[in-house]
Each structure stands twice: as C-alpha cells, then as structure tokens.
Image (cartoon, grey):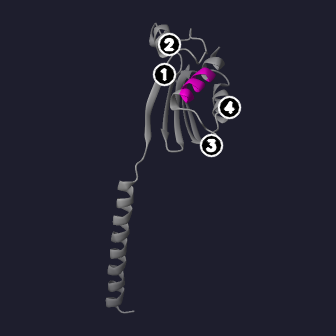
Amino acid sequence: MDKASVLGDAVKYVKELQERLKVLEEQNKNTTCHVESVVTVNNGPQLSSDSSSNDESEAEAVSGNNEALGPHVEARILDKDVLIRIHCKKEKGLLLKVLFEIQKLHLFVVNSSVLPFGNSILDITIIAQMGTRFKLTRDNLIKSLRVAVLRSMS
C-alpha cells in the first residue's frame, strides 16, 4: 500500500469512530439511570432490635454524645448493585455476621473492605449484587443490617 491509501483508510476509520461515538452518546443520553439516595440510620445502644419500631421512637432513644451512638448504616442502590457502608464499634466476628446477613437477604458480595479507625471503630464497605429473590426496600435492608450489627454487639 502506498501512503495515500494508508492515509485514506485512517481518515475513513476515524470517521467511523466519530459516528460510533455519536451513537453511544445518544444511547447514554436516552438511558436513565436510577440511583436511590443514601439513607443513614443512627441508633443508641439502648434500642431494642425490634424492627417494627418507628423512626420517632428511635430518634427519641438516641441520646448522649457521639461515642454512645450505635452503628451508622448507609445503603445505595443502583440498578442491581448495592453499596453498603457500616461505621460501628469493633466487635469480634462482626464482619462474618454482617456477611451472613447479606447472604440471607439474597445479595451476593462482589467486594468488601474493612478498615479499622483507631482501636475501637470499624468502617465496613461492601459492594453486592441483588439476587433474583432480593425483594427488600432500601430502608428494610438498612434495618436488617442494623439489627444484625446490634445483635453481634450485645
């Protein structure tokens, strides 16, 4: 091939790539991505693990300084992916109990990270995917995980 042919093929290929880029950008613009917002729940250690308690009674039960607060649980849902963050007191076997609870809820762990903060605090981050039998709302997911953490702390 001579230089003109190579250059002509290169120009043709670049134009094909530009057209493909336009198509992909249009598809991306038309695709709506549904993200559920973060929900945070703080509970004091004196709370019962009864998941039927309402938010007002939970808010009234939380008192004292930040050190007295129980687990801080967050969850985000994006399509079939779930991001879970738990900030709590360090307890032996806690991660195992949390992972077991996640499995019972028909979530499949893709990645997890546990970082100690000081000598007594853990920051747990878990990325999971929903199984076909996952039926919980984000709020119920948070309540279930909070109950599991509270049980392991007692």
Kind of residue at badge 4 = Phe
Front one among 57 and 154: 57
Tell me: 37 left or right of 49: left
Quadrant, the C terminus = top right
Q: Are marks 1 and 4 in contact (CB under 8 Å)?
A: no
Residue at the (56%, 11%) spot, across then down? 45
Question: Which residue position is annotated with label 1?
Answer: 41
Cα distance between the residues tagged 3 and 1:
24 Å
> From what the image shows, is residue 131 above or below residue 62?
below
Residue at the (39%, 59%) spot, across then down? 27
Q: Quadrant of residue 66?
A: top left
Cα distance between the residues tagged 1 and 4:
21 Å
Question: Which residue position is annotated with label 2?
Answer: 58
Question: Which residue position is annotated with label 4?
Answer: 100
Instruction: Please give the range of residues in magenta.
Output: 140-148
Kind of residue at badge 2 = Glu
Q: Are marks 2 and 1 in contact (CB under 8 Å)?
A: yes
> From what the image shows, is residue 63 above or below residue 82?
above
Q: Nearer the viewer, mark 2 or mark 1?
A: 2
Cα distance between the residues tagged 2 and 1:
9 Å
Whether residue 99 appears in this view of the structure is yes
Q: Nearer the viewer, mark 3 or mark 4?
A: 3
Mark 2: few/some/many CA within 10 Å (<14, 14-19, 20+): some
Residue 150: x and y, percent? 61, 18
Label disc, if present, on residue 95 of the rendered structure = none
Question: Which residue position is annotated with label 3?
Answer: 131
Mark 4: few/some/many CA within 10 Å (<14, 14-19, 20+): few
